[in-house]
Amino acid sequence: MERPHFSELQLQKLYQKEFLKDKDLEEIANYQKKGIFSLRSELLLMIYFSIIIFTSGIGVIIYNNIDSIGHLAILSANFILMLVCFHFSFKKAKGYSNHEVLFENPLHDYLVLTGSLLACVFLGYINFQYQIFDDSYAYVSLISAILCFAVAYYFDNRIVLSMAITSLATFIGISITPKSVFQNEVYSNLELTYSGLILGMLLLVWMEYSLKHKIKAHFHFVFATFALHLLGVCIIAGLLSEHWFVFIPILLGFIYYFYRFSYRVFATSLFAFMLLYGYFGVNVLGGKILSFIDFGAFFEFLIMVSPFYVIASIYMFIRLVKQFNTEKNASVQ
């Protein structure tokens, strides 16, 4: 197990609530001074990178030896490895539950991840070779998303859930403009912007529903993170378009919702990124409004005060995040 570390503020709060005694405080302080280092997180991270390198290496080997190996042999080996991964995963799984269910050994989570990656590779490769869906990879992305959602919910795997949401976003992007996902055309394609907004809102709707009905409620951070970045990028893209005025209420709603939600779950990363996207969005909106005003002689003055505005913005950002963390730490009371 990973060694827990408690801040002095947290210990004092527990002490004031009489959960800890003087002797307990002294023992915890002496324990933390030893600086015992846990290798658990580092080993799991190495395993994660090993899986990524392994699946990438398979792709390189296939690419370099496709003529000598043969397509059917590659597909068969991929499929067999995928079945082996899922066989042991199902064998060790405790079954589906709406609540959090963990493997007794965390290595099985990475076995689930490996099987999911191999399944996505299998689907993509079989479409590439046999043109099941012609030249479109939209349906491959959709099938991969459905498969990863099922695997993520059954095995309670957040990484596979991230893969599912990514595949779903890819499906929507490819189904509208095939090159947009690969060429990052979200800022020049308004249809893709609207699609991203719809997907982000749907993720939030499902997240709120699952929180209310306690269906894998602990997945909320994954859904909120993807929705925040997706909505933030699309809102800024919309503010840069000709129909920028349509995105003003969406920007205000975005800031209000994630401000309340970040305090609800006390997630510092959500709060910080909400501030960043809100800051960029408000500045883009301000630039649009200023473009309609003729400042004339005041233009040089605006250039002079702009560095002070940036410094003040950085100061306010740091202050707001520190204030958020203070309230977050005080919530243990």
Image: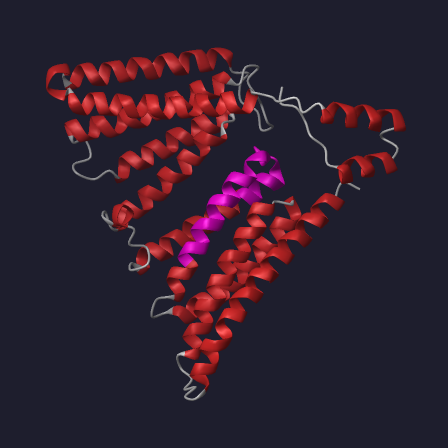
Give coordinates of residue 81: x percent, y percent.
32, 14
Taking the spot 85% from the left edge, 29% from the top edge, the residue there is 20
Could you say which is closer to the camera, residue 243 or residue 215? Answer: 243
Q: Look at the image and tell me whether residue 10 can be seen.
A: yes
Q: Is residue 241 left or right of residue 33?
A: left
Taking the spot 34% from the left edge, 17% from the top edge, the residue there is 82
Q: Quadrant of residue 330?
A: top right
Give coordinates of residue 233: x percent, y percent.
41, 55
Is residue 207 positioned above or below 300 on the image? above
Is residue 320 positioned above or below 247 on the image? above
The count of marks equals 0
Q: Is residue 14 left or right of residue 148?
A: right
Is residue 130 positioned above or below 253 on the image? above
The C terminus sits in image quarter: top right
Q: Is residue 111 magenta?
A: no
Give coordinates of residue 170: x percent, y percent.
33, 42
Q: Look at the image and tell me whether residue 118 can be seen.
A: no
The N terminus sits in image quarter: top right
Where does the magenta region start and end?
A: 207-234
Q: Is residue 229 magenta?
A: yes
Taking the spot 32% from the left edge, 60% from the top edge, the residue there is 190
Q: Main secondary structure of the magenta part?
A: helix
Could you say which is closer to the camera, residue 180 or residue 28? Answer: 28
Could you say which is closer to the camera, residue 61 or residue 260? Answer: 61
Q: Is residue 13 left or right of residue 204?
A: right
Could you say which is closer to the camera, residue 237 or residue 211? Answer: 237
Q: Residue furthest bottom?
A: 297
Give coordinates of residue 305: x percent, y percent.
51, 75
Taking the spot 41% from the left edge, 12% from the top edge, the residue there is 87
